[in-house]
């Protein structure tokens, strides 16, 4: 048994769990703990030190995140064999993001894009993944179809037709490890350095970064109350526009059908292409679903992009784009020698979940949960704050925007923060 | 019970399994089979039709590959609900790659980069993956560190130091969904349209495609018997060189230490950067391992790229690059808003396998297997063909090159093909 003495400095401003974390970390780095040995259980440690279980849990979690200990299921936490010089130099270089977040002691984090956790989901995914490994054990030894596995693309085509009105053949679908990967492919297909691309202002900063990295000239187009200002867009003289019509990012408005038709007419007449980023099109709570631009388009002027990051899991990295037929040849020319960027194991897993109807059931389930949460949030805000605030983007998606008269963004964030509440700015978009 | 009549055309040149496949496919498309119904077992079908089990198996496999049926573990094959118009139009557009391959009836396929299958491997991966899903069930709901999970990068840094002599901090490691993804990031970091990049000729066509898509001016540098011609390289006036020094692709020679030092000296003196693609550096069978360029470099002139595609699994899409410290800031500027392109679930899985020593054991195991196969192949070729052929690149990796005097590549491929043997050309590189 390992014996140690740990003195808390109760006068210190540093939270107890951080003091405990640092102490254990130090013990590990000084090799006072033997690699592979087990940490006392949370309960035992709490009793031993006379601290709350939450404090111990927080300290242990931090040790785990930083890789000092690792958990083995049903047996506890064990000291890992991390080489001390590697880690300590890393620690010096920069505190990890998670450490920084924890230090702020946030009680309520309103981080946009956070997902709701469905207990049955992980076991479903695991089961399908295990079956896929079994069934396709030879297939996982190869790179696979560079556009994505055909059986998954067939499922996606069916889903898109029924759920988003997107009309396409599986051949037009290309899978990629995230929307940014696909945007980069589009840039490489269609644009050269210095070419112009238009996007909403404010708009998705992750897309803007891709366009910047391809040295494009980004033309910001202002928003009206109901989405992009079409008059201003029509003055744009480049060939490509990037839009989030179903749920404008970050403001959240839904582009009305009239503007959609207007945009498509413009694109057809002046031979422009529109990238439609439908990042959370599945999550709509009020009013009728408006069909995707792609579904309304008659002239092959829309590149549709969707993702499984919002409604399923961001960590599997599966997004897809639907190319108009006339671009398939260019795509082939540019990317036929590329390997797929998406895990084939995950592709098989997702294929089976979609084929067996689980994806549809999952969508229905999370739509209900998110809608309830969304309504709860809206009614609470209205009840407490009444007319003092204006709520934007309240029909869809995973976030809302609040406009407060007479107070700056910074002020509001500070004020919330002092109450242990974390909210996020729009200014960076 | 479903009754059907199937007449084989034994006079047809078409193999029996293809005839059977087409018949069942037709039945499914004409809706004579009910969706969800079970196909007769291989054994029953073989008895019923008086054909060999192999024939039935091949036909069933093709039906599965094409998505007409799907397998449920321990119960059999079931007709899937693929929308008929989707599928048939797809079929018309182009036969799938697998179908084409199967039609050629290849008995021995010498496809380079094919992996050896270790039965225990899938179960190890599955176990680790299940444990990761369990342990990290909250982590998989977020995007994660854009450079890759730190705990995995710590493991990779340790591994690279011990196994490839690469010296780096985990902070310098960036994970990406394949080498091509990382090469594209390097292009975006360091080059603009029209800039020059040098590469070996012949060289890896997948890298060339990336450079072309970034509109770079590709400068081919000839090879000597022992790798790149350094005299010619020194005349190159661009800033970036892409090399495969540990196992030249496709020729397979290993760049000797003298040339490595010469290259590094040149890079340091004239302020050039070298991309070292060490795609199968783990697989070396003869002679002493030569340290990586990165490990020999004193001046931060090497970007090292490695992958888990060759020695572990191509289907998980995990590659990594090691940036010199002076490039970390540029990387941060360009890509801080990017989400990681690699599955976090796979990252956790791999982290656990590496931490628990399984990756090292796996490497030792496959090195032994591949070495035995490699030697067997070499000695057979020498025994049968003697002096008529010359073998290149015989010290490392997953492929060898054979040079046959007086016969063209095309002739050789044709001749092998007529004996049911598939070999691959080098001309496309």
Image: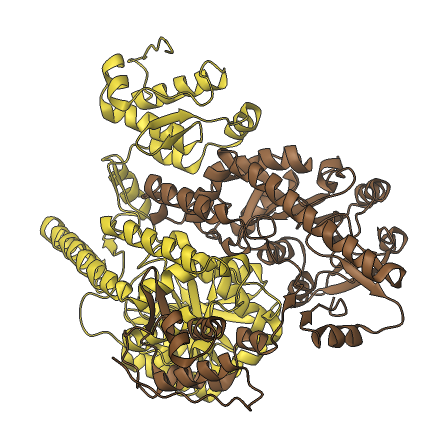
Chain colours: A yellow, B brown
Q: Residue at x 36, y 88 (%)?
A: B5
When asked about the image quadrant of residue A250, the answer is bottom left
Q: Quadrant of the C terminus of chain A?
A: bottom left
Foreground of the two, B232 or A268: B232
Up/down of A45 relative to A257, above or below = above
Q: Position of residue A257 (x, y in %)?
A: 28, 80
Q: Nearer the viewer, residue B309 or B173?
A: B309
Q: Position of residue A200 (x, y in %)?
A: 40, 67
- Where does the image place residue A259, in percent across and percent down from the top left? 32, 79
- In this rendering, the count of numbered labels is 0
| Farthest residue, direction left | A383
Question: Quadrant where the N terminus of chain A lies?
Answer: top left
Q: Is residue B61 above or below residue B129?
A: below
Query: Which residue is more in the foreground, B314 or A401?
Result: B314
- Residue sitting at x 28%, y 82%: B2
Q: Is residue B276 left or right of residue B65?
A: right
Image coordinates of residue A422 in percent, x first then y, are: 28, 42
At horizontal 42% and vertical 63% (from top left) the residue drawn is A319
Give the left or right position of residue A407, taking residue A263 as reference: left
């Amino acid at each position: 048994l390992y014996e140690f003495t740990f003195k808390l400095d109760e006068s210190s401003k540093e939270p107890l769990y951080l003091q405990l974390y640092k102490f254990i970390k130090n013990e590990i780095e000084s090799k006072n703990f033997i690699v592979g040995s087990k940490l006392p259980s949370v309960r035992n440690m709490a009793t031993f030190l006379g601290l709350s279980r939450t404090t111990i849990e927080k300290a242990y979690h931090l040790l785990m995140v930083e890789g000092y200990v690792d958990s083995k299921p049903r047996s506890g936490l064990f000291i890992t064999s991390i080489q001390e010089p590697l880690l300590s130099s890393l620690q010096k270089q920069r505190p990890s993001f998670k450490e920084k977040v924890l230090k702020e002691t946030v009680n309520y984090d309103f981080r946009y894009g956070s997902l709701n956790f469905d207990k049955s989901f992980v076991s479903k995914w695991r089961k399908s993944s295990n079956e896929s490994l079994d069934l396709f054990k030879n297939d996982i030894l190869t790179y696979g179809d560079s556009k994505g596995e055909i059986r998954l693309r067939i499922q996606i085509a069916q889903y898109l037709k029924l759920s988003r009105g997107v009309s396409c053949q599986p051949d037009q679908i290309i899978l990629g490890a995230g929307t940014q990967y696909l945007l980069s492919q589009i840039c490489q297909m269609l644009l050269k350095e210095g070419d112009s691309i238009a996007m909403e202002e404010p708009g998705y900063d992750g897309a803007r970064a891709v366009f910047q990295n391809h040295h494009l000239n980004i033309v910001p187009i202002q928003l009206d109350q109901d989405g992009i200002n079409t008059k201003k867009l029509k003055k744009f003289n480049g060939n490509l526009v990037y839009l989030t019509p179903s749920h404008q990012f970050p403001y959240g408005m839904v582009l009305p059908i009239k503007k959609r038709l207007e945009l498509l007419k413009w694109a057809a007449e002046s031979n422009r292409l529109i990238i439609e980023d439908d990042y959370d099109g599945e999550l709509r709570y009020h009013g009728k679903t408006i069909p995707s631009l792609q579904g309304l388009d008659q002239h092959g002027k829309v590149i549709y992009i969707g993702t499984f990051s919002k409604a399923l899991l961001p960590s599997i990295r599966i997004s897809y784009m639907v190319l108009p037929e006339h671009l398939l040849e260019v795509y082939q020319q540019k990317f036929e020698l590329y390997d797929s960027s998406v895990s084939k194991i995950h592709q098989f897993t997702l294929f089976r979940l979609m084929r067996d109807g689980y994806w549809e059931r999952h969508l229905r389930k999370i739509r209900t949960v998110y809608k309830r949460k969304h309504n709860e949030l809206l009614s609470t805000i209205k009840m407490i704050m009444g007319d003092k605030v204006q709520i934007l983007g309240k029909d869809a998606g995973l976030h809302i925007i609040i406009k407060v008269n007479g107070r700056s963004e910074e002020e509001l964030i500070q004020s919330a923060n002092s109450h242990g509440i974390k909210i996020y700015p729009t200014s960076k978009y």
